[in-house]
Amino acid sequence: MTASPAGRASSAPLMGRDAEPTLFEISVPGRRAYQLRTTDVPARALEDLVPAAHLAEAPVAVAEVSERDLVAHVTRLSHRQFSVDLGMYPLGSCTMKYNPKFCDAVAADPALASVHPAAPAELTQGWLEILVNLEERLCAITGMAAATLQPAAGAAGELTGLLLMRAYHASRGDVRRRVVIPDSAHGTNPASVTLGGYEVTTVPSNDRGLVDLEALRRVLGPDVAGIMLTNPNTLGLFEEEIVEIAAAVHDVGGLLYYDGANLNAILGVVRPGDMGFDIVHMNLHKTFATPHGGGGPGAGPVAVAAHLVDFLPGPRAVRDGGRLAWATPARSIGRVHGWHGNALVLARALAYIDVHGAEGLTRVAQHAVLNANWLRRRVGEILPAAHDRMCMHECTLQATLLKERYGVRALDVAKTLLEEGFHAPTVYFPLIVEEALMFEPTETESPQTLEALAQAIERIAERAATDPEGMRRAPQTTPVARVDEARAARHLVATADTPRPL
Ligand SMILES: Cc1ncc(COP(=O)(O)O)c(C=O)c1O
């Protein structure tokens, strides 16, 4: 067989429709999947070690299975999962890119993984070096003065940033009440503002999908603590008037918070610090080699401009002469995570940054933007872009034509894509776009894979014309067929007992 000159992309839908039994269903009394080491520590009765008040009255039900059955069960389940290692995962706003295995190897190195977080700085100079180096690299990438590596996720970074904002204003005796957010913002932004003790003021987007500068000027005032923006914004568009926005917010004494979830789009090209931002969080578990989703663990470091460094959470690893030490900034807001954050995620990020180098990181952003624009143009006649002009790393498309012609909606397109062997894009987000399908191809997908996705979308458009009813029931070939999502979310069955049928 000869290789096709253009190469060929492969992707396949998940298979296997037989219901997988739970571990409780395959449990047999007396079976064990573990063996404990023999030890010379004398056996003690449980009652001698645990106060009676904390002892369970009856044994807790646990599944009893052999190692062989356990491994088979978990392996079967893993074959029914879609993942970034299996195929394309164009879930807009989530940056589900392929993460190099090299970074996994770094994080698994026992020299890093087996160090106790309470070990003193004198014995852990290597780990501190990693943390200081990562902080310096992240500050160079964002154009900021210093950073905390503690927050465990983007949303945790947002809350940290808002607490920093509050501490900064309080230190000046300035009581401010509101934080401004555009109407296209990610849901965590208003949630973090509320948790941070501020009120949300929403500013509308204009017909170009960008912050409406005049509307922003109207809502700004001396009680505004700051604005939270992501740039590129959640429509995948670059806020072109960011310098004017920054000036308007700074003029009323507010601070600019950069939601760096979309940093993948601008790495090495433009820095939030140069756009006028004062506080930046970064989702290391998107841009820097840790998979996003599935509940973590992640890392959402927060970098700040010079006037906020004194308020950063502590302790931070710092250079202290020729040594490295832990230090807590003078007016620190305190800890935002136990120990030093999700340290192995931090090690992976440093490995990713150093292996790419400055030029490599710039290429990451350039290719991410190129791939999104290629896809936007390639499928635009089927799924028109919400704003048909140059996008950044993701494109917000719409299923409006398919809906008008065949009654097929964004959800149906996304579900049918699963039968084609691709993960679905983000749907119905941002909320301000009708029938939104937000694709983020990322830089790690090849032109062949992008073309395969485009062809799958073409097949879906043909099917919409002939079999709209079938599409409304799709997927039918995957391990779990179409579920009633609202009901599944509201009727949670979190029990080991045999679930009642929905
Ligand atoms: C724009 C934006 N902001 C914030 C977040 C929150 O990040 P995390 O999921 O790590 O809390 C996300 C997550 O996808 C996002 O897309």
Image: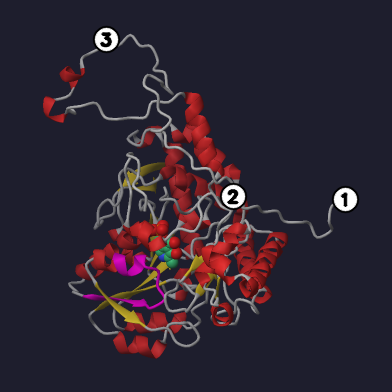
Q: Label 2: how many residues lie within 10 Å, few (<14), some (14-19) or many (20+)?
A: many
* Start-end of magenta stretch: 177-192
Find residue 283 and report its image quarter.
bottom left
Q: Label 3: how many residues lie within 10 Å, few (<14), some (14-19) or many (20+)?
A: few
The residue labelled by disc 1 is: 2
Which amino acid type is marked by label 3?
Pro
Of callouts 2 and 3, the N-terminal one: 2
Find residue 295 and report its horizontal and vertical position in percent.
Answer: 40, 50
Q: Is residue 308 visible?
A: yes
For marks 1 and 2, give the CA distance.
28 Å
Find residue 389 and report its horizontal and vertical position in percent.
Answer: 60, 82
Which amino acid type is marked by label 1?
Thr
Q: Nearer the viewer, mark 1 or mark 2?
A: 2
For marks 1 and 3, give the CA distance.
67 Å
Ligand 1's quadrant is: bottom left
Q: Nearer the viewer, residue 11 or 224?
A: 11
Q: Label 1: how many residues lie within 10 Å, few (<14), some (14-19) or many (20+)?
A: few
The residue labelled by disc 2 is: 14
Left/right of residue 360 with respect to residue 493 in the rendered view: right
Q: Nearer the viewer, residue 381 or 94?
A: 381
Residue at image x 60%, y 79%? 390
The correct choice, above or below, for 331 with respect to 321 in the image is: below
Q: Residue furthest left?
A: 53
The residue labelled by disc 3 is: 42
Find residue 7 and report its image quarter.
bottom right
Q: Nearer the viewer, residue 37 or 118?
A: 37
Of callouts 1 and 3, the N-terminal one: 1
Left/right of residue 123 with respect to residue 17 in the rendered view: left
